[in-house]
Amino acid sequence: MDNDTVYLNEYVVEALRVPEDYIETEKLAQVREIERRTLLYRPKQEEYNIKDKTIILVDDGAATGATLVVSARWIRKRKPKKIIIAIPVAPNETVELLKNEVDEVVTILIPPTSNFTSVAQFYDNFEEITDDKVVKIMNAMYQK
């Protein structure tokens, strides 16, 4: 990713009076983490050719939608034909936010925001995926 694709929830920033220097520090930390993961997951650093293609952006769910918003904006800069977000669960407020960013949002369950505390509450097993597991999956994909 590039470091000029940023999404801030302005409501949260204003409500919590988040200082600008904190935002800049956190932005830098996130860019470093993206760079680390990019090197780990895609060591050849090949650019994805997604121009004029339909892109399906998949996640295990969306609480705030922030990660999907910034990902969709990054993808949009590469001029795909269409962007679809596919998620099993997200509160209505988040689904509406995502609809403003992409061509289509597909979701199975849209609980009321008042009943939604986290994506994990809708899973029996919500283990974090380790870097090692991602690398193994990516390597298997590249070997096909």
Image: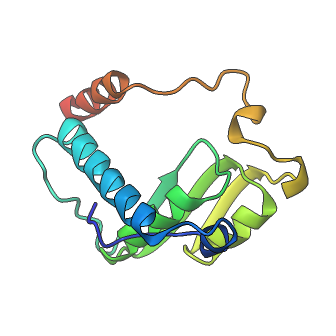
Q: Residue at left 70%, top 41%?
A: 119
Which of the pair 82/110 is nearer the observer? 110
The quarter of the picture where residue 133 lies is top left
Compared to residue 82, the image places residue 84 above or below, namely above
Q: Position of residue 59 (x, y in %)?
A: 55, 46
The quarter of the picture where residue 95 lies is bottom right
**In the picture, which quadrant includes the N terminus?**
bottom left
Residue extending furthest toward the left: 44
In screen coordinates, is 11 left or right of 93?
A: left
Q: Position of residue 91 (x, y in %)?
A: 78, 56
Q: Position of residue 90 (x, y in %)?
A: 73, 53
Q: Residue at left 70%, top 70%?
A: 15
In screen coordinates, is 27 left or right of 70?
A: left
Q: Position of residue 101 (x, y in %)?
A: 55, 75
Compared to residue 102, the image places residue 137 above or below, namely above
Q: Residue at left 77%, top 33%?
A: 121
For residue 54, say whether it is visible: no
Q: Residue at left 13%, top 40%?
A: 43
**In the picture, which quadrant includes the C terminus?**
top left
Which of the pair 30/51 is nearer the observer? 30
The quarter of the picture where residue 106 lies is bottom right
